[in-house]
Amino acid sequence: MAARSLNKAMLIGNLTRDPNLRFTPNGTAVCSFGIATNRSWTSADGGEKQERVDFHNIVAWAKLAEICGQLLHKGDKVFVEGRIQTRDWKTEQGDDRRITEIVIDNMMLLSSRGNGAPVSDLPADDSAGVSSTDDTATDDSKKGKGKKRGKKAEVKEELPADEAVESVEDVSDDIPF
């Protein structure tokens, strides 16, 4: 009986650079970017607060890569979920190189965009949360409809403050105490 294993990484952090969207020779999109995660703790001996920042290389493929390239910008807070992968290769000079990266299959934009607009103010057709794998990604353009959408897209629309106030009904007379 073979033992089961699990390779899953879940991160919430800030983008350290704008995503780099490229295409393979056969046309598959690949997007890479970096995420910084912060951790702080108080040392047991002196009670002094300490902090540490870890940097992670993130890679997205196919439809998710295209969406990451469109939506994400340096400084954005995101949730990503995927698997840890280490790759080895040789440079043209013959040097051995190794990189460890998170290959994601789920991404959710958590913070405001670079222009200061919160995610909730995005147009309804933008995707704030996207989950995609090669076999489950939805691409309506392949079906001839021309419109592309991720598997999951969650965007909350809020009314402007003055419209929200006008739509609230005064029910203070109905309260029994």
Image (cartoon, rainbow, N blue to C red):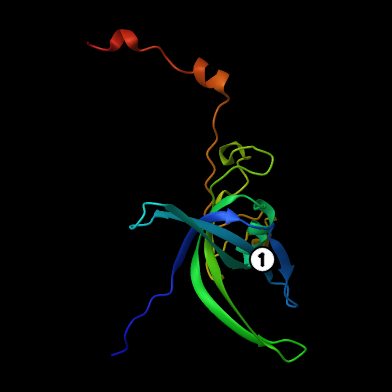
Across the whole image, how many numbered discs are drawn on residues? 1
With 49 as the anchor, is 155 left or right in this view? Answer: right
Mark 1 Cα-neighbour bin, 10 Å: few <14, some 14–19, many ≥20: many
Q: Is residue 31 visible?
A: yes
Quadrant for residue 27, please give it. Answer: bottom right
- Tell me which residue sits at (67%, 61%) in the image: 66
Which residue is at the front of the view, 44 or 95? 44
Residue shown at the point (31%, 7%) measured from the top left: 173
Tell me which amino acid carries mark 1.
Cys
Give the residue pinned by disc 1. Answer: 31
Identify which residue is drawn at 52% across, 58% down. Answer: 37
Provide residue 111's location: percent of width, then percent of height.
56, 45
Q: Secondary structure at mark 1?
A: strand
Which residue is painted at 77% across and 89% down in the image?
93
Compare residues 77 and 134 and report the one nearer the observer.
77
User: Does 54 sit above or below residue 167?
Assistant: below
The C terminus sits in image quarter: top left
Residue 46, horizontal then vertical, whole percent: 36, 54
Q: Position of residue 115 (x, y in %)?
A: 69, 40
Q: Quadrant of the N terminus?
A: bottom left
Q: Is residue 151 visible from the viewing direction of this image?
A: no
Residue 128 on image: x %, y %: 57, 48
Q: Going by the image, does 123 lie left or right of 23?
A: left
